[in-house]
Image: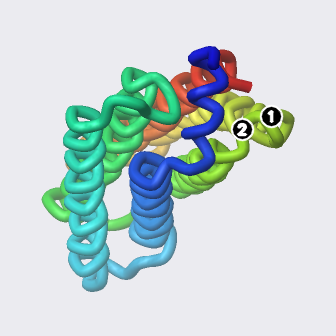
């Protein structure tokens, strides 16, 4: 039996990596939703509670990523190249890390308000995490749903391009309209972290595309 046929037998029956990756993708979706709530809807006195929830999701992501690494060390046959599994888990964990850094800066700086551009950035990030989740969920049936799977990483790329535009407009808006220098510095650092989060989502999309090219 050819190696490809062997892998095709094991892929749908995988009981370790795909469930762990799905759980990790659920975690990043939860963090993305909390981030949007933190920036878009929350009063100042409610922010700390959301920051704690985001930290909890980030810690859960660290645990899941470590579990995936342990399983990779202990498993001979994997449903996909172990390098791709490891890269996907690492990229998702990095999205969680940056989302947590945004929350940490919100907690430290306690800005008076957030701009419409920061809010739009969180919407883009949240959409990106949902696309990640959709792609991870589709890994089990990649060969049967390649068209749908392809749409996920293409949408992630489009979201990253939209984030670049919003980020540029957001920085311009701050320097043109924010008269309080301290608030300007706070908001600038936060939107810069949001832009990094959007970039990490796009990095995850690139790994997803690599898996598609290899296995679809």
Can the viewer see residue 76? yes
Residue closest to the far front: 1
The residue lying toward the viewer, choosing from 4 and 26, is 4
> Would you identify the image quadrant in which residue 31 lies?
bottom left
- Above or below, 29 against 193 in this view is below
The residue lying toward the viewer, choosing from 111 and 49, is 49
Give the quarter of the figure containing the C terminus.
top right
SS for tag 2?
A: loop
The residue lying toward the viewer, choosing from 73 and 151, is 73
Horizontal side of 175 relative to 54 (left or right) equals right
The residue lying toward the viewer, choosing from 136 and 15, is 15
| Pointer 1 with pointer 2, Cβ within 8 A | yes
> Would you identify the image quadrant in which residue 58 lies?
bottom left
- Above or below, 85 against 67 in this view is above
Residue shown at 32%/38% (left/top)?
94
Q: Which residue is mark 2?
A: 142
> Would you identify the image quadrant in which residue 61 lies?
bottom left
Q: Which residue is mark 1?
A: 146
Can the viewer see residue 115? no
């Amino acid at each position: 039996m050819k190696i490809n046929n062997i892998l095709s037998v094991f892929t749908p029956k995988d009981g370790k990596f795909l469930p762990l990756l799905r759980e990790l993708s659920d975690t990043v979706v939860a963090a993305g939703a909390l981030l949007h709530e933190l920036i878009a809807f929350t009063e100042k006195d409610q922010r700390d509670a959301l920051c704690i929830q985001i930290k909890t999701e980030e810690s859960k992501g660290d645990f899941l990523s470590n579990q995936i690494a342990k399983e990779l060390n202990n498993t001979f046959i994997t449903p996909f190249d172990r390098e791709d599994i490891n890269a996907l888990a690492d990229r998702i964990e990095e999205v969680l890390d940056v989302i947590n850094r945004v929350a940490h800066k919100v907690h430290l700086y306690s800005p008076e308000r957030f701009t419409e551009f920061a809010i739009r950035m969180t919407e883009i990030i949240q959409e990106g995490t949902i696309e990640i989740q959709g792609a991870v969920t589709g890994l089990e049936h990649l060969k049967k749903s390649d068209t749908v799977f392809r749409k996920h990483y293409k949408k992630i790329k489009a979201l990253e391009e939209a984030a670049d535009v919003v980020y540029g407009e957001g920085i311009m808006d701050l320097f043109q309209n924010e008269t309080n220098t301290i608030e300007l510095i706070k908001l600038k650092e936060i939107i810069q972290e949001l832009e990094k989060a959007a970039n990490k989502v796009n990095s995850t999309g690139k790994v997803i595309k690599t898996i598609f090219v290899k296995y679809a």
